[in-house]
Amino acid sequence: MTFHPASAPDYLPIPRMRELQLARLRGIVARAFERVPLFRQRMEERGLDPDCLSDLADLARLPFTTKSDLRDTYPFGLFASPMAEVVRLHASSGTTGKPIVVAYTHQDLEVWTSVMLRALAACGVTAGDVVQNAYGYGLFTGGLGAHYGAEALGATVIPISGGNTDRQINVMKDFGVTAICCTPSYFLHLVDRAGELGIDIRSLPLRAGIFGAEPWTDSMRRRIESEGGIRAFDIYGLTEIVGPGVGIECDCQDGLHLFEDHFYPEVIDPETGEVLPAGEEGELVLTTLSKQAMPLIRYRTRDITRLLTEPCPCGRTVRRMTRIARRSDDMLIIRGVNVFPSQIEAALLQVEGTLPHYQIILEREKGLDAMEVQVEVTPQVFSDEVRVLEGLHQRLVKALDHTLGLRVGVRLVAPRTLARSEGKAKRVVDRRES
Ligand code: ADP
Ligand code: ZN
């Protein structure tokens, strides 16, 4: 794998990285204290000031920031730069409520570009690649984040944005695309549609996919890699912190390296707020160490992960986290049992004959929660005898029961009947009256 000079911070000796982090942390906390009234007030309520940080562990004494803080101060209440210095605004897709607005100075955009460059370099993208950027351009951070990173790397960027699937396929074929950025679910849709048009994506030069913005499992990765004839890398980020480019898988595909010289990670117990020892699973909390326009201190992401403690064979020293399988707020409680959509995905895709397209329907029947999992089956199975379908149905019910500890309804549906999304897939349809 070639080394890009911009990736140097990925390999800093750990003590040097900790020094750098502490120095940056002090600076950013001082900046937020001076310029963001909500943060100052919370610090003062606790009798804290920026001088309280003599060690990185002292970060645990500082107050958290949450998504509702961003909403309550909508639109510009957490900005730490005057508008004259703000050069870009983005807003989140608002999948979980009122949108939030984030700001960038020139320097913030440079940092964002550099982490996206490092992310793409880590999964083997080089100046020789032709990158199809099918993340949505616009207020959403996905499009421009990947765009600037790939361009800075020297790759050829195709800013096609999301949607218009047939055109995506033509462009991929005609322009000799070698790497694609989009959501994993949209990539599967592209593969399917290409099949309908008589194009086998495996026969094209495409060799890498950089997929993120939604949870996906290792079983999904295997399907994507074999159906697309590519290697599929997981990229993580969130609007509040920067957009895409907080973390990325390297060639080892075993956990996501975090660009911790800019985004300092902690993992906490979501119930108590206590910092957990390295290696324990909990909620990821991120502190932006260099953000000028909107520094966020101890931002609660609601994403559940754990930090890996072993060094990575790739030689990067920046820490890794396990892929985000779930969010603390996407848990479904069905007849008293806790269920996460990612568990359902993993169980379904273990069973041969299914397609990686599914949806979870929640209904209330006679006061009780009922869950039905709808999953597409392969055209071959679908045209088979009823007996074959029944056998598959039984295996799926069993697999789900085994994984969830719960018997749930399963409905096999024809290929291409469930709605596809150009961005984040909508896995759960809740028809219960609230
Ligand atoms: P929202 O969807 O909340 O409006 P964003 O578009 O900024 O905001 O999405 C950020 C969220 O998307 C993350 O907090 C995380 O839950 C999810 N996400 C992003 N990348 C990944 C990934 N690679 N794996 C799992 N979840 C991801
Ligand atoms: Zn690595």
Image (cartoon, grey):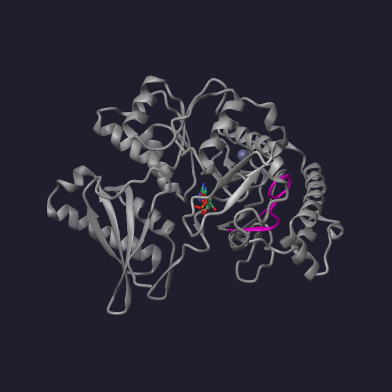
Q: Residue 283's quadrant in the figure?
A: bottom right
Q: Within the magenta stretch, is there residue 146?
A: no
Residue at position x 65%, y 71% in the image: 272
Q: Main secondary structure of the magenta part?
A: loop
Q: In this view, does 432 lie above or below 5?
A: below
Q: Where is residue 181 in the image (x, y as percent from the top left)?
A: 48, 35
159 sits to left or right of 410 = right
Query: In the rendered image, is residue 164 in sight?
Result: yes
133 sits to left or right of 73 = left
Q: Where is residue 328 in the image (x, y as percent from the top left)?
A: 53, 63
Residue at position x 46%, y 25% in the image: 178
Q: Give the range drawn in magenta.
A: 286-301
Total labels: the figure holds: 0
Q: Where is residue 261 in the image (x, y as percent from the top left)?
A: 72, 43
Q: Position of residue 277 (x, y in %)?
A: 69, 61
Given residues 1 and 96, the one toward you in this image is 96
Q: Within the magenta stretch, is there residue 298?
A: yes
Quadrant where the N terminus lies? Answer: top right
191 sits to left or right of 71 = left
Q: Residue 344's quadrant in the figure?
A: bottom left
Quadrant where the C terminus lies? Answer: bottom left
Ligand 2 falls in quadrant: top right
